[in-house]
Amino acid sequence: MAKVDAAAIAAGTSGVALMENAGGAVADVCARDWRDVRRVLILAGPGNNGGDGFVAARRLAEAGHDVVVALAGDLASLKGDAAEMAERWMGRTVDLVEAPFGWAELVVDALFGAGLSRPLDGRSAAAVRAANDSGRPILAVDVPSGLDGATGRPLGDACVRADATVTFVRLKPGHVLLPGRALCGRVHLADIGAPDSAIAAARPAAMLNRPALWRSSFPEPSIEGHKYSRGHVAVWSGPPLAGGASRLAAASALRAGAGAVTLVGPRPALEHHAAHVTAVMLRELDPRAGWSDFLADRRVNAWVFGPGAGDTEASREALDQGFSSGGCAVLDADVFSIFEDRPEELGAAIEDGGVEAVLTPHEGEFARLMGGRVEKDASKIDRAKAAAALLGATVVLKGPDTVVASPDGRAAVADNAPAYLATAGAGDVLAGIAAGLLAQGMPCFEAAAAAVWLHGEAAKSFGRGLTADDLPYAIPAALRALENGDRS
Ligand SMILES: NC(=O)C1=CN([C@@H]2O[C@H](COP(=O)(O)OP(=O)(O)OC[C@H]3O[C@@H](n4cnc5c(N)ncnc54)[C@H](OP(=O)(O)O)[C@@H]3O)[C@@H](O)[C@H]2O)[C@@H](O)CC1
Ligand SMILES: Nc1ncnc2c1ncn2[C@@H]1O[C@H](COP(=O)(O)OP(=O)(O)O)[C@@H](O)[C@H]1O
Ligand SMILES: [K+]
């Protein structure tokens, strides 16, 4: 944002004009979201975030509100645009320690924004705690004070827990990554007049995972097609009594539009599968020919390995055969145990086999696979990107804020998964959807991002009470939402 602001100013929009628009947007949200509120307390910090607070104070007072500004530090030490805005504020200013929380009906947090560089301490930390404990609604300016906008994590113990946040120009990672997203409340994005050329000057760290990112490569069934032209997915089945995971993946690949899906495994496992599946095909693994022979069949376009696979000699051998067969693969679950603390070897196997791979670890599996190779304090976006670069594969780092990262540096963050998607087997469904899309020819990053979005929409369409068994049945509703262009 510093780059965008600087480029906007260089292109002729003054810093004061940007700040006026920023503070004005804050005042607009106060008036719109808190219609009946009259008494507004504004906590103003020592930098430009505080400057936005002074603008909001003036604009709210002009609109008839009773406003008090509680300033951290003294007026004389304000600089630049913030000093200018403080000068234009004619109302009451008190010291931060005297902030009248009991009097206020709404608190505007303009203490620290993008410039926060260290944990809050002393009076700022005390004011933040008092604001959180006051029971008054809090509207944060840019980011809740104490939150690191680049990572979505508080820098220290004290952090504002806002009911809403007004940010400017573009969302920051901290507005979508957890716990930041929860600390921001409702997020409003305001245009403050930074020209597009200024925005283009800064490369975004990531995009929100929305259909616009991948819609153009989403597969459409062709009237001239047949089941195999819609793609054939092979799912490796583990041993009997661990078959649920691979069955969920297989059913989901079919629902995502693959023309055919086959579960491949030892006969005792297939006997269990046979009691459950109908449209999914079953193929007994030929111990002499093996998994690679099945994959070599030209009609297999994507394979899934990991859900319910087991970390056994047989599955290690099959995984090796998979790598040497090449093709598109979704690697999940037990693959991360097999390659525990050996991501370089996994990356080499992917590269040597010429495999187009999508890896879908949750945080625990990610830590197991990567060992200490990725800096744990880095943002979830940067951790996923680092792993994608090291592995030469698309990495889907799952959770409430699933990040999809490509080795080419692109990243997308999902914000559409409902909390009740955290249910056993949901990850197996995601692996299956991704494989179904890969088999239909979608490139890895796009297939993974589309799968994550459909997974979240499917869960939402079903609602609470969702189990992973329900998820494949909910995929058609997500596909309809996509078709109807509900989201952009
Ligand atoms: N033209 C623009 O740029 C626009 C900017 N806009 C607004 O400006 C905000 C960014 O402003 P900013 O860069 O001045 O940073 P801000 O968040 O106010 O804090 C910096 C001050 O805090 C201090 N400080 C840091 N950590 C601290 C700590 N723990 N405890 C105590 N002090 C600490 C730091 O001191 P230092 O670290 O240098 O010692 C510095 O004095 C942005 O979020 C948006 O709201 C909009 O108006 C649009 C136009
Ligand atoms: N709090 C949450 N909110 C929304 N989605 C979540 C949350 N926690 C996990 N998920 C999603 O649920 C799925 C769980 O997958 P995973 O951890 O592999 O479980 P399993 O191995 O049981 O299938 C992932 O897609 C993940 O993104
Ligand atoms: K703030």
Image (spheres, rainbow, N blue to C red):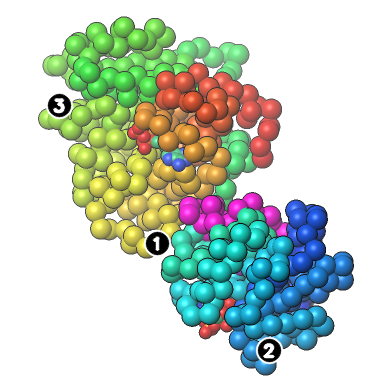
Q: Residues within 10 Å of mark 1 (few under 14, many from 20)?
A: some
The answer to which of 231 and 92 lies nearer the viewer is 92
- Helix, strand or loop at disc 1? loop
Nearer to the camera, 476 or 292: 476
Give the magenta part as a residue range: 171-191
Q: Relative to 452, is 461 above or below? A: above
Q: Amino acid at mark 2?
A: Leu
* Label 2, ligand 1: CB separation under 8 Å: no
- Please, what is the three-letter code of the amino acid marked with disc 3? Ala
- Closest to the camera, between mark 3 and mark 1, is 1
Whether residue 322 sits left or right of residue 484 in the image: it is left
Q: Is residue 298 magenta?
A: no
| Residue at numbered disc 1 | 378
Mark 3 neighbour class, 10 Å CA radius: few under 14, some 14 to 19, many 20 or more: few
Q: Position of residue 484 (x, y in %)?
A: 69, 27
Alpha carbon of mark 1 to alpha carbon of mark 2: how far?
A: 36 Å
Q: Is mark 3 within 8 Å of ligand 2?
A: no
Q: At which x and y percent is residue 184?
A: 58, 56
**On the image, numbered disc 3 is attached to which residue?**
314
Q: x%, y% of residue 449? A: 50, 39
Which residue corresponds to mark 2?
75
Q: Residue at x 20, y 39 (%)?
A: 338
Residue 34: assigned label: none
Q: Secondary structure at mark 3?
A: helix
Query: Mark 2 or mark 3: which comes first in sequence?
Result: 2
Front residue of 355 and 461: 461
